[in-house]
């Protein structure tokens, strides 16, 4: 297993570039480990491409799914007191929140 991971390791410069593009701070001593891990992931994805899925029908995706429609009517839920009971502090029928902008 170790030989497979080593053979699939990415170059250190590639890992540095990926880290820079991702805005991640990667220490020098971590680069080799990340190179091996990323190489293994890429190898695993390449193995998925070898699977024959021509006989598998596609799953329902967003382009095939239909939304269930319901009547569009405005309601307040008739539970104002229940909702306001969750407020740590309230003034009349409103939540009271601390001032955040001066």
Image (tube, rainbow, N blue to C red):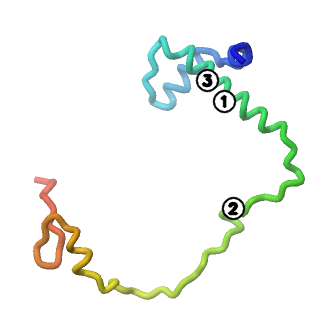
For residue 37, the mark is: 3
Q: CA distance from mark 1 to mark 2?
A: 25 Å
For residue 61, the mark is: 2
Residue at (80, 38) in percent of width and height: 49
Residue at (87, 44) in percent of width and height: 52
The reply to whether dot 1 and dot 3 touch (C-beta < 8 Å) is: yes
The one nearer the camera, 84 or 43, is: 84
Q: CA distance from mark 1 to mark 3?
A: 6 Å
Q: CA distance from mark 2 to mark 3?
A: 31 Å
Q: Is residue 100 above or below residue 3?
A: below
Of the image marks 2 and 3, the number of the one nearer the N terminus: 3
Q: Is residue 55 above or below residue 50?
A: below
Crowdedness near tag 2: few (<14), some (14–19) or many (≥20) residues, C-alpha within 10 Å: few
- Could you tell me residue 20's position as x and y percent? 49, 25
Q: In this rendering, would 75 be left or right of 68?
A: left
Residue at (77, 38) in percent of width and height: 48
Q: Is residue 94 above or below residue 43?
A: below
- Could you tell me residue 59's position as x and y percent? 74, 60
Q: In this rendering, would 80 be left or right of 58?
A: left
Crowdedness near tag 1: few (<14), some (14–19) or many (≥20) residues, C-alpha within 10 Å: some
Crowdedness near tag 3: few (<14), some (14–19) or many (≥20) residues, C-alpha within 10 Å: some
Q: For the residue labelled by badge 2, is the local secondary structure a helix, a strand or a loop?
A: loop
Residue at (61, 75) in percent of width and height: 67
For residue 59, the mark is: none
Residue, disc 1? 41
């Amino acid at each position: 297993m170790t030989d497979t991971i080593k053979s699939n390791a990415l170059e250190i410069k590639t890992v540095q570039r990926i880290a820079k593009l991702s805005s991640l701070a990667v220490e020098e001593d971590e680069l080799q480990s990340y190179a091996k891990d990323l190489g293994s992931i890429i190898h695993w994805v390449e193995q998925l491409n070898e699977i024959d899925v021509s006989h598998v029908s596609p799953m329902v995706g967003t382009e095939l799914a239909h939304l269930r429609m319901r009547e569009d009517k405005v309601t307040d839920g008739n539970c104002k007191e229940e909702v306001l009971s969750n407020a740590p502090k309230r003034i009349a029928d409103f939540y009271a929140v601390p001032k955040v902008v001066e």
